[in-house]
Image (cartoon, coloured by chain):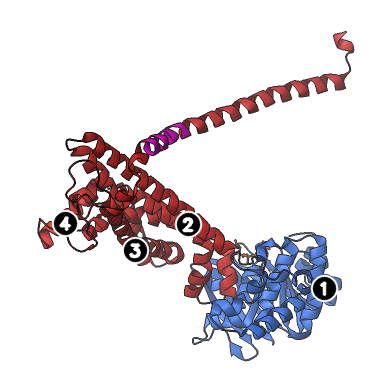
Amino acid sequence: MTIAIEKLNAYYGELHAVAGVNMVIPERAVTALIGPSGCGKSTLLRCINRMHEIVPGASVVGSVRLDTADLYAPDADPVAVRARVGMVFQRPNPFPTMSIAENVLAGFRLRGERLSRSEAETKAEQALRSANLWDEVKDRLKSAGTSLSGGQQQRLCIARALASKPDVILMDEPCSALDPASTQAIEELLDTLRIEHTVVIVTHNLSQAARVADRVAFMATIGAGDGGHLIEYGTAQQMFHDPVQPATQDYIAGRFG
Amino acid sequence: MKTSTPLPTKTTATTIRINTRRRVADRGFTLAVIACGVLAVIPLLSVVWTTVSKGLGRIDVAFFTQSMRGITDAGGGALHAIMGTLLITCAATLVAVPIAIGSALWLVEYADNATTPAIKTLARTVRTVIDVMAGIPSIVAGLFVYAVIALTVGPGYRSGLAGAFALVIIMVPVVERSGEEVLARVPAELHEAALALGVPKWRVILKVVLPTALPGLVSTLLLGVSRIVGETAPLLLVAGFTDSMNYDLTSGRMVSLPVYVYSQWQNKGVDAAAYDARAWSAALVLLLGVVLLHTLARLIVRGRKQ
Ligand SMILES: Nc1ncnc2c1ncn2[C@@H]1O[C@H](COP(=O)(O)OP(=O)(O)OP(=O)(O)O)[C@@H](O)[C@H]1O
Ligand SMILES: [Mg+2]
């Protein structure tokens, strides 16, 4: 499912956080958003599943389309949009009142969609397998989700997002709270996720972006109070070896940000 | 000699001295804190001890199966007061908790995120009203209900329900404030996680916020019940006093345990010792009831968790 972002501007009250972004994010690929802190990467990401607007006073102007569906059409329901797009956060956030299995199926349960017992078992196993977590937790599905390690919790959150079969998966610095081994586990997972999903990942780790991303978008603020712009967008190969914009060159070379 | 002492040794010596001093200070402070703790517990233990030792005397079958109807000396019981406390407390809790938790939810989950000036003003007003309510002395709450009843139903009307309403006024601010704190402690990340799964906000509140906050909300409930279960003055005013059973909250005088204690103490008959004994036993029953309630609530929360 292709994501087409057009003339997107996002605000927190008066603050302009994302300024005039146009980009097409291809399906079945991993796209990385990189850029200095505060340039609006998370904000842009959260515009793709209409999570931006839950912040009091926040607003969005412009359009985001998933294939042909305009997410910001007047009759589009943000709740329905979010159900179709999976999101993984910086810090693992399993529901503390739920077991591992319940966490995986939390989407269905919280939305009030009933599953038969066999359906639930299959879905939970599938999602946990896709998140490379099944072997580690298959004997303790009933224990609390919060009893897992940080890296396992993050994969549990990925499984929770995958269980609802989203076409798009958004990840906001999913590895920044994790140790190297868990980070590697998630990077390997990204390799399989790209086969069926459109993956957008925000990362501060350029070597991670180089390892996992097919395409890379570099964002930065140009002037003060001007919001984050999309400076350059291309294949990972081109962005890391042959960036065109001086700002991109500086950032990649570690000269700012 | 002094000048020839190697520098490292000197440093070590200094370090050791400082450590010793620090350890002494640490010990001293620890002891002081423990002493404060003990000091705080002594009055409590003394109260419990006095109540238990003096109250055990009338813990017998009659005490739990009889009222005071027609009793003028020894004998009799507190069944009517126990029932009265149960009925009035339950009624007050059933009315107060939904109001209190409802407004806490509204304030924390909706009003605090609102950008509309009207809603912000309303939220500020609600908070002010609750703060004022929290400062109302319980006798004034009783007088308020008394006045309302006198103006509507008539000055002579007494009932358990009227007493319950006075207790609602006392209970709502306690439960609301503590509930607000408990609800605000539910991590924002859990909200986000649920919203991002495509869950409507009201379901997030029902299925994520409330279950996550449940242990805290149970404590809140207990705090509220503990606050009202020992109230005497407002009940004396609007629920009145009686020696007889009354299971009907809506009409007739209804006595509660604290009021029973008070009246036994205040209006002693010829056999004063019998009245004293009943007063202490009623106090003990009240104490045990509160302890039992706390234990039950803890067990329920723990049972749900695993
Ligand atoms: N909840 C919020 N309320 C107000 N302003 C916000 C909020 N979240 C972010 N901002 C502001 O919006 C701008 C963009 O923030 P955003 O979080 O999108 O940056 P980012 O690129 O993700 O940064 P980082 O790499 O540090 O995560 C920043 O100036 C930030 O201060
Ligand atoms: Mg961010």
What amino acid does circle 1 point to? Glu
Q: Position of residue B47 (x, y in %)?
A: 39, 35
- Mark 3 vs mark 4: give the one in front: 4
Residue B207 appears at what percent x and percent y? 52, 71
Q: What's the magenta region?
A: B41-53
Question: How far apart in space, not on screen, are marks 4 and 2 (Cα)?
Answer: 32 Å
Mark 3 vs mark 4: same chain?
yes
Image quarter (top left, top right, bottom left or bottom right) of the N terminus of chain A: bottom right
- Name the mark on residue B158: 4
Name the foreground residue: B6 vs B30.
B30
**Callout 4 secondary element:** loop
Which mark lies nearer to you, 1 or 4?
4
Q: Is residue A211 left or right of residue A10?
A: right
Residue B163 vs residue A219, the one in the foreground: B163
Residue A124: quarter of image: bottom right
Please state which of the two labelled residues, at mark 1 or mark 3, is closer to the viewer: 3
- Both labels 1 and 4 in a single chain: no
Ligand 1 closer than 8 Å to label 2 CB = no
Furthest toward the top, the residue is B1
Q: Are marks 3 and 2 on the same chain?
A: yes
Q: Please tell me the numbered disc located at residue A188.
A: 1
Label 1, label 3: how far apart the Cα atoms are: 54 Å
Under mark 3, the amino acid is Leu
Q: Which chain is red?
A: B
Which tint was used for chain A?
blue
Q: Label 3 to label 2, Cα distance in Å? A: 16 Å
First-in-chain label (3 vs 4): 3
Residue placed under numbered mark 3 in the picture: B94
Task: Classify A232 as above or below B24.
Answer: below
